[in-house]
Image: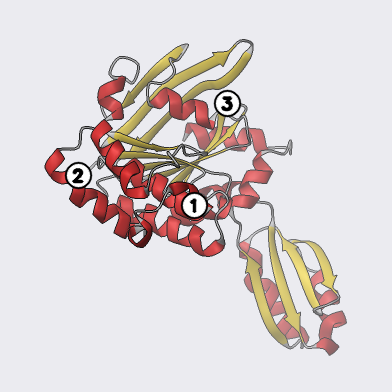
Amino acid sequence: MPQQSVIAVENLTRRFGDTVAVDDLSLNVDQGEILGYLGHNGAGKTTTVRLLNGVLAPHHGTISVLGLDPLHDGVALRRRTGVLTETPSLDERLSARENLTLYAEMYCVPGSQVRERVQTLLETFELADRAHERVGGYSRGMKQRLAIARALIHEPELLFLDEPTSGLDPVATRQMQDLIRDFVGRGERTVFLCTHNLTEAQRLCDRVCVLERGRLVAMGAPRELAEAFAAPLRLDLEVSPGHLNLAHETLARMPGIESIELVESEAVLTITVTGREAIPALNAALVQAGAAVYRLVPHEPTLEDVYFRLHQDQPGVAEQRQRMVEA
C-alpha cells in the first residue's frame, strides 16, 4: 500500500536580498516518517521550516503540507503541526502546568480535555512532580522536555523539531530520542528533524537530507548514503604480537589494499581496502601465511563520514551526489 505524502515540495526557492537561503528544493516526506534535515549553520534549515509552516512566503516553487498550501492556509495548517525551535520560548514566570494550559487554550483544545491532556504530558515528560514550580528554576533538560510537551499539546499530525537535544546531557539526550520515536508510534505521525547531531540522525531517521548553502546535495536512508558516499573501508586487524611483520608483509603484496598503518599503542594494523569484497581474501591470505588472527573488524561507514565527505571537493563526489538526489 503506497504511503501518503505529508510534505511535497517542488523547486522551492527563498532569497533574502542577494542571499539564496533555499535553492530550488524538491522533496517529499511520507506519513509516519522521521526525516532528518542536516546542514551547517546558515544552510537553510530554519528557513525551510518557516516556509513549510507558512511563516515565510517562497519566491518560487510550490509547497503542500498535509494537503494544504502553507501561504494561504497557514492558520489551519499550524493547528495541525507542532514546532520546537532551537531556543524554545517558555514563560518562565509560569509553572509547567500553567504553560501547557495556556497553550492548550491558544490551540483551542476542548476545555473538557485540557486538564487530562496536560497531566498526561507532564507525566510522559517526567515533569509531574515539579509541575507547580516556576519554569525559570528548571534545568535546560527540563525546559527542553516542557517545550516538546507544549508542541504536542494539540496532538499535531506533523512535528517540526529544531535541534531538540542541543545542550542536553547523554541521559537526557537518549530520553528525548526515545520520546521522538514514541511520538511517531504506529506510523500515523511524522517528524521533520533539523539537527547537527549526526549520530542522532543515524539512530532516529528513516531518511536524511543534506543541505549545502540552501541546495539539497543528498537524500536517502542513512545506510544507503553511507554506502554511496563514505570513504574507502577501514579495518582493524589484531594478530599475535610476534606476527605483526608477517601480517604487514602479506597484506602489502595483496591487491585491493590502499594503505596499512600500525597503531603502536594497541599493536593493531589499520588497513584501508577498496571495498568489503576484499575482506574474505585478506583473511584467507593471513591464515595461509601462518599469522594468528585475533580480530578483524571493519569500521562501518557512518552518516558522519557521509556528511564530511559531501562537504569536501573530492573528485567524483559532485556527480555521485547528483545521481543520489535524482534517484
Residue 74 at x, y percent in the picture: 31, 21
Q: Residue at x 63, y 36 (%)?
A: 40
266 versus 311 height, above or below: below
Towards the viewer: 238 or 156: 156
Which quadrant would residue 159 be assigned to in this image?
A: top left
199 versus 28 height, above or below: below
Q: Identify residue type, mark 1.
A: Gly
Q: In this figure, which residue is indicated by the disc labeled 1?
A: 137
Residue 315 at x, y percent in the picture: 73, 37
Q: Disc 2 on helix, strand or loop? A: helix
Q: Disc 1 and disc 3: Cα gap in Å?
A: 38 Å
Q: In this figure, which residue is indicated by the disc labeled 2?
A: 114
Residue 307 at x, y percent in the picture: 62, 45
Upstream in the sequence, badge 1 or badge 2? Answer: 2
Q: In this figure, which residue is indicated by the disc labeled 3?
A: 214
Q: Residue at x 51, y 25 (%)?
A: 47
